[in-house]
């Protein structure tokens, strides 16, 4: 299937096994009954769509639903985002968005930051495919917009 | 094969390049074609030997540049069967050609209550300028629907085009479905109702014989870069008496006859519509491009692509999980094949094929409403030209199979 002469073996740097796993089996996709935050985002240029719902307990994220349709990068990234969110406070989640953005920009990350990213570090290879970065960031940008509004409204 | 493809390929230096380790298989011709050495040389030759402004000055190089620029216009006029070179206006691309008509003709002739008719297959450039004209004037935009099998619904067209219609815009070959539309019949419907027709020939002029006289169209536009020419230059053909009656839409140098501080009078056709120093080098190179195509014979170009498309459709039928959009036979169909995999997103497919050296288009192909009418938000698209081979079709099909293996293992 992936012969030595094929260019497809190079695909692994983009589609790491963690990404393909999240793409095939996205996490936390069940819709919530009474979300406090409900946001949809899409990229009309490629048709990627994500739908993020959050339940908040005070400042902490107590319930998460992330679903959508689109390419492997956008959907696995959204699933990784869902896993990250649980138990985080809104401000911690926003810090995480900043960290993911820095990773995509190709910033040098500390070992501590890499540890914090955990599985999300699998998305790092996307930075070498510039046209796909917007796929990876779609859900993170949507989360940032939703949380910033919410944090802003609460203060 | 009707064309000597190996000989043609030798004229295109870019076809020698590799993408990573893999030889380039260029199947994104509907987006832009590659350029033969002759076209590249024409640009270099102008800047190296006789770079000068046109239509002014009496020095040798200015005269040479003007002659080459106007000679290119004459070649294009001949290529599309225009009655004279003055009916051929240089634009930046077909988008500008359509905008020129929407502003210069539309604003003067379209009123509230009038109707503008376009087809469901238009590129965004065949929709948005008319939406804007409609909102400026209070006119209404009507859409000729497509049939299930990716053709235009001509029966619906005959009802939609009415005495209220002022202008019809129709894409000659769909950039998504490959369908070749009967624009001559649409033109007759338009004329029978006292309306005009503008033909979007962006995908047809590069790939099939075309004559504005035979089509009996009022306006026709295309971009040079999809037909071996450079980017940044396009054409608007207009019926001379229509162009003559139209006011210019851009003002400046070259388009005037006389200027005082109070007023100005307009230059003759086609200069009235070519304000400022034009894109001289690329116009000259466009003349070389259409000469190259004319030497191959547009009948041969069409036959070559029909053969490739037929073979490709046959091979696509092997892919059980891939759905081809548009007509599934080569009858009135050009070499554009849009398709979707039932699981793999077009962008993942496009990235995977790129790793194999295969360039295809992915996305909405600048025809969002048409793509959406197929209940998808994006598609992959392979499109052929004179230098493509059946072997490259095989590479594409095997590439899709290999991608299935990668994502669906």
Image (cartoon, coloured by chain):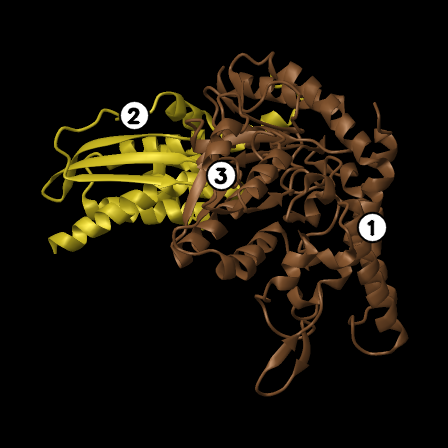
Chain colours: A yellow, B brown
Q: Nearer the viewer, residue B34 or A101?
A: B34
Query: Does residue B62 appear to the left or right of A17 in the view shown?
Result: right
Q: Position of residue B250 (x, y in %)?
A: 58, 68
Tell me whether marks 2 and 3 sit on the same chain: no
- Foreground residue among B303 and A95: B303
Label for residue B288? 1
- Disc 2 element: loop
Nearer mark to the viewer, of 2 and 3: 3
Mark before the other along the chain sequence, 1 or 3: 3
Contact, CB < 8 Å: mark 2 with mark 3? no
Asked whether residue A5 is in view, the answer is no
Q: How far is disc 1 from disc 2 in space, using C-alphas?
A: 57 Å
SS of the residue at dot 3? loop
Q: Position of residue A74 (x, y in %)?
A: 40, 34
Residue B161: give its label: 3
Q: Secondary structure at mark 1?
A: helix
**Disc count in the image?**
3
Q: Crowdedness of circle 1 by 10 Å Cα count: few (<14), some, many (20+)?
A: many
Q: What label sits on residue A27 in the rendered view?
A: 2
Q: Chain of mark 2?
A: A
User: Residue B39 at what x, y percent from top left?
Assistant: 81, 50
Closer to us: B225 or B125 = B125
Chain at tag 1: B
Same subunit: marks 1 and 2: no
Report the chain holding disc 3: B
Q: CA distance from mark 1 to mark 3?
A: 39 Å
Q: Please tell me whether mark 1 or mark 2 is closer to you in this view.
A: 1
Q: Quadrant of the N terminus of chain B?
A: top right
Residue name at image x 65 percent, y 47 percent? B220
């Amino acid at each position: 299937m992936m012969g030595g002469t094929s260019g497809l073996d190079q695909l692994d740097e983009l589609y790491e096994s963690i990404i393909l796993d999240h793409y095939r089996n996205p996490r936390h996709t069940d819709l919530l009954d009474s979300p406090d935050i409900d946001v949809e985002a899409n990229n009309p240029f490629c048709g990627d769509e994500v739908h993020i719902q959050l339940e908040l307990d005070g400042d902490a994220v107590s319930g998460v639903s992330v679903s959508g349709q689109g390419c492997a990068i956008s959907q696995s990234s959204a699933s990784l985002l869902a896993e990250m969110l649980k138990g985080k406070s809104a401000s911690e989640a926003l810090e995480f968005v900043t960290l993911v953005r820095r990773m995509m920009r190709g910033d040098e990350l500390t070992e501590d930051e890499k540890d914090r990213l955990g599985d999300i570090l699998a998305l790092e290879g996307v930075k070498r495919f510039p046209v796909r970065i917007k796929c990876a960031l779609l859900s993170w940008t949507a989360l940032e917009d939703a949380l910033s509004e919410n944090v802003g409204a609460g203060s | 094969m009707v064309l000597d493809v190996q000989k043609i390929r030798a004229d295109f230096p870019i076809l020698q390049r590799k993408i990573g380790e893999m030889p380039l298989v260029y199947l994104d011709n509907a987006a832009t074609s590659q350029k033969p050495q002759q076209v590249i040389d024409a640009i270099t030759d102008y800047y190296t030997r006789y770079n000068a402004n046109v239509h002014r000055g009496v020095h040798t190089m200015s005269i040479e540049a003007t002659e080459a620029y106007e000679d290119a216009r004459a070649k294009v006029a001949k290529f599309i069967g225009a009655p004279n070179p003055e009916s051929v206006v240089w634009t930046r691309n077909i988008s500008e050609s359509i905008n020129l008509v929407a502003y210069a003709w539309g604003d003067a002739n379209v009123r509230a209550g009038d109707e503008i008719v376009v087809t469901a297959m238009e590129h965004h450039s065949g929709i948005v300028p008319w939406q804007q004209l409609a909102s400026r004037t209070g006119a209404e935009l009507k859409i000729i629907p497509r049939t299930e099998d990716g053709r235009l619904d001509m029966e619906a067209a005959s009802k939609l085009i009415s005495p209220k219609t002022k202008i019809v815009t129709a894409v000659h070959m769909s950039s998504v479905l490959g369908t070749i539309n009967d624009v001559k019949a649409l033109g007759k419907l338009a004329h029978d109702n006292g309306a005009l027709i503008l033909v979007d020939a962006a995908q047809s002029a590069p790939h099939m014989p075309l004559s504005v006289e035979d089509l009996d169209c009022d306006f026709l536009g295309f971009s040079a870069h999809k037909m071996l020419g450079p980017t940044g230059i396009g054409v608007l053909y207009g019926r001379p008496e229509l162009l003559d009656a139209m006011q210019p839409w851009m003002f400046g140098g070259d388009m005037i006859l006389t200027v005082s501080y109070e007023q100005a009078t307009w230059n003759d056709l086609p200069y009235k519509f070519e304000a400022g120093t034009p894109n001289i080098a690329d116009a000259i190179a466009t003349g070389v491009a259409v000469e190259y195509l004319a030497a191959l014979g547009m009948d041969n170009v069409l036959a070559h692509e029909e053969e490739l498309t037929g073979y490709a459709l046959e091979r696509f039928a092997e892919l059980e999980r891939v759905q081809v959009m548009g007509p599934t036979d080569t009858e009135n169909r050009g070499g554009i094949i849009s398709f979707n995999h039932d699981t793999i997103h077009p962008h993942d497919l496009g990235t995977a094929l790129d790793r194999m050296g295969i360039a295809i288009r992915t996305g909405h192909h600048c025809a969002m409403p048409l793509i959406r009418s197929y209940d998808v938000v994006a598609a992959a698209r392979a499109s052929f030209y004179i230098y493509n081979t059946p072997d490259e079709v095989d590479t594409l099909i095997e590439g899709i199979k290999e991608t299935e293996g990668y994502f669906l293992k």
